[in-house]
Image (spheres, rainbow, N blue to C red):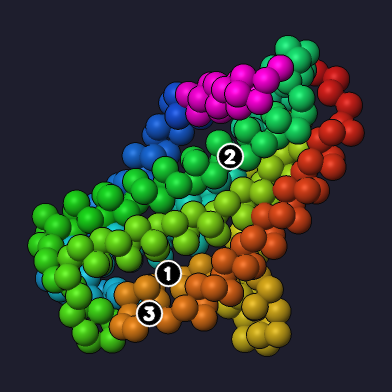
Amino acid sequence: MSVASGVSGWFRFLGSELRLVFGRRRNQIGLLVLAGIPVMLAVTLRLSGHQGEHGPDFFSSITSNGIFVALAALSVELTLFLPLAIAILAGDAIASEANLGTLRYLLTVPVPRSRLLAVKYVALVIGGLAGVAVVAVAGVVAGGVAFGLGPVTTLSGIQIGMGVASVRLLLAMLYVTAGLAALAAIGLFISTLTEQPIVAMVATTAVSTLMWILDAVPQLAFLHPWLLVHHWPAFGDLFRQPVFTDGIVAGLWLALGYAVVFYVAAWATFIRRDITS
């Protein structure tokens, strides 16, 4: 088999997996739920006539520019809804296939286990990116309708153009996706340990929730820098002038570490797993 045909087969397999992921009615409804939250946020603030008074700094800037609705929505959904979406996709990736008996069929095609796992993980990351994009785009559209779009006053009080702000929003989306990709690696590892998708979903969600709880306990400050979720809110630093990069860089390195460790753990488990169903 040539390298070209191997690469082509890999992308065909990935395309098939993505059609499966985005073709599930449950996942489509999930995307609608993700999109609905920034819309509700914009509508609520528009009708109430008040700015957000709690949360990260950009909550208080929502009514000044619609782009802050997207940032506020990402902040809100990072604590539960986006991790839950990753957990659902991770449960479907391996555990659900094993439960339905399709995993054994895939491996008898034959498809090398390493390739199968890699395709599943890439599909998880793309699914996470899609979820983040839906939240951000819905936030910008709803915020633009409710509060308008235009030059953005950063959290440092310096104004930047809408074009620059859009680029920074895109970078924020990619940063959030990087964090979710690390959580996806954890979920994929858990998914290789069970044939019950609900177990993988609950366990992955529990891991994320537990990290948020630990990160909120002041007495555990020594542990905070090692928690995956600790640096997730750092995407807001992209809307400072100049951009604060310390938290973002630390978050990216931590996400990479988690992703590598748990993907390798998933691979080591999966290649030795006895597929009986």
Q: Which residue is mark 2?
A: 122
Q: Nearer the viewer, residue 118 or 227?
A: 118
Which label belongs to residue 243?
3
Q: Amino acid at mark 1?
A: Phe
Left or right side of 111 for 63? left
Which image quadrant for residue 219? bottom right
* Label tally: 3
Q: CA distance from mark 3 to mark 1?
A: 10 Å
Q: Residue at coordinates 55% horizontally, 59% vertically from top-left?
A: 179
Q: Identity of the amino acid at label 2?
A: Val
Q: Is residue 39 above or below residue 240?
A: above
In the rendered image, residue 83 lying in the magenta stretch gets the answer: no
Q: Is residue 261 visible?
A: yes
At numbered mark 2, what does the secondary structure look like: helix, strand or loop? helix
Q: Secondary structure at mark 1?
A: helix
Give the residue pinned by disc 1: 235
Segment colored magenta: 1-20
Please report the residue visible at 48 percent of the width from the left and 24 percent of the height from the top.
19
Q: Tell me residue 76's x, y (percent).
A: 40, 63
Q: Earlier in the sequence, mark 2 or mark 1?
A: 2
Q: Around disc 3, counting alpha carbons within 10 Å, would you say few (fewer than 14), some (14 to 19), or many (20 or more)?
A: some
Marking on residue 4: none
- What's the magenta bit mostly, secondary-structure-wise? helix
Q: Is residue 17 magenta?
A: yes
Are the residues tagged 3 and 1 within 8 Å (C-beta)? no
